[in-house]
Amino acid sequence: MTTREARCSCGQLRVTCEGEPAIVALCHCRECQRRTGSTYGVAAFFPRKAVVVSGAYVDYERPADSGSRVLHHFCPACGSTVLWEPSRRPELMAVAVGAFADPAFPAPQKVVFEQHRHPWAAVALGG
């Protein structure tokens, strides 16, 4: 079984994920743009039981564009958002794909909130 580790910039907050993600999604919503400082965010959704978190984190909860709530966990030392819990899918945990720092990580299979996509931000979906 595949084991992957995501971590914050300073390395104190780590997330170990067992198995393959249930889905990898690219989100163009404005909140993901603000959270990442980029034009979109990419999340790997894993079953909650497949995710082990180690290290300290601070929480921030916000409404999602979908209308549900999202609870973000970020490193109190470096500020990296590493994982979050979408209330509309309580059985899943979302992990920032960039936190894995793995170019071989599976590509997004789904794109959401394309109405907020920057026109120059082209993306290719994986299989």
Image (spheres, grey):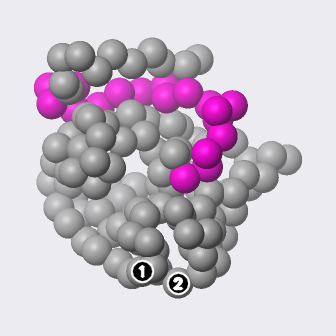
* Tag 1 and tag 2, C-beta contact below 8 Å: yes
Q: Residue at x 69, y 57 (%)?
A: 5
Please tell me which of labels 1 and 2 falls first in the chain: 2
- Between 98 and 51, which is closer to the camera in this rendering? 98
Q: To which residue does mark 2 refer?
A: 56
Question: Looking at the picture, how far across and down is residue 96, in whole percent?
Answer: 48, 51
Residue 66 visible in rendering: no
Residue drawn 17% across the image and 61% down it? 63
Q: Is residue 71 above or below residue 96?
A: below
| Amino acid on which disc 2 is placed | Ala
- Tell me: 5 left or right of 56: right
**Callout 1 secondary element:** loop
For disc 1, the marked residue is 76
- Marks 1 and 2 sit apart, C-alpha to C-alpha, by 7 Å
Residue interval drawn in magenta: 99-116
Please tell me which residue is depicted at 42% across the width and 40% down the height of the picture. Answer: 42
Q: Nearer the viewer, residue 98 or 18?
A: 98
Q: Which mark is residue 93?
A: none
Give the camera-side residue of 67 and 55. 55
Q: Label 2: how many residues lie within 10 Å, few (<14), some (14-19) or many (20+)?
A: few
Q: Does the image show residue 114? A: yes
Q: Secondary structure at mark 2?
A: loop
How many marks on residues?
Answer: 2
Residue 23 % position (x, y): 53, 38
| The quarter of the displayed image where residue 67 is located | bottom left
Residue 65 lies in the magenta stretch: no
How far across and how far down the image is residue 11, in percent?
61, 69
Q: Is 126 on the left or on the right of 66, as rendered? A: right
